[in-house]
Image: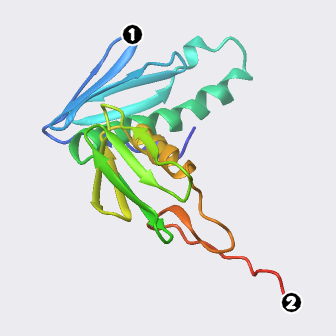
Amino acid sequence: MSRIAKKPIVLPTNVQLSITDSEIKVKGPKGELKLNNHPFVSIKVEGNEVWVTPNLEVAKRKADERKFKAMVGTYWRLIRNMVLGVTEGFKKELEIVGVGYRAQLQGNKLIMNLGYAHQVEFDVPADVKVEVPAPNKIIVSGIDKQRVGQVAADIRKWREPNPYSGKGIKYVDEVLKLKEGKKA
């Protein structure tokens, strides 16, 4: 079994977790998240603690137990991220590097000048909030960690950092190792 799942997930007082046969719901001050329940995993709520264990009664063979135990750690982390999301939220910061490269928010669209002959328009999903505090900085935030990371990756994909000059869209905490150019 996963080592991390040997510890319980502690629920804050302002978070409610409900489990049905098909899904897990976590409701908190920032919103509500849902996750499909997997038959390999058994989830129990005891007071303000959530325990995730493998559901070995469903296993048909001894070889299946390894898959079951692998899912326990995954679901422990998914539920923990849901609890953190509805209480604190998640945030990814992107930085635009390059002369003339900039971004602006117009309504529900992120418009970026990234050195192409045209402007790049990115439709912001409803469940994610995008802010542009400066022309060269983009902040993506929301309650679903996976969704925030995916939207940030989609924005970054429009102009990934150049390995020689470093121009492009990069995460603020990303360290680029620049390559050396041609020698004369």
Foreground residue among 78 and 4: 78
Look at 40% across and 45% down and name the residue there.
7
Look at 46% across and 67% down and name the residue there.
100
Marker count (numbered):
2
Q: Position of residue 118 (x, y in %)?
A: 51, 48
Mark 2 vs mark 1: which is more N-terminal?
1
Q: Position of residue 170 (x, y in %)?
A: 51, 62
Q: Residues within 10 Å of mark 1 (few under 14, many from 20)?
A: few
Left or right, 73 with reference to 44: right
- The residue labelled by disc 2 is 184
Q: SS at mark 1? A: loop
Q: Which of the numbered marks, if any, corresponds to residue 93?
A: none
Quadrant hosting residue 67: top right
Foreground residue among 126 and 23: 126
Left or right, 178 with reference to 124: right
Q: Which of the two marks, 2 or 1, is nearer to us in this view?
A: 2
Quadrant hosting residue 93: bottom left
Amino acid at circle 2: Ala
Q: SS at mark 2? A: loop
Taking the image as drawn, is residue 160 in sight? yes
- The residue labelled by disc 1 is 21
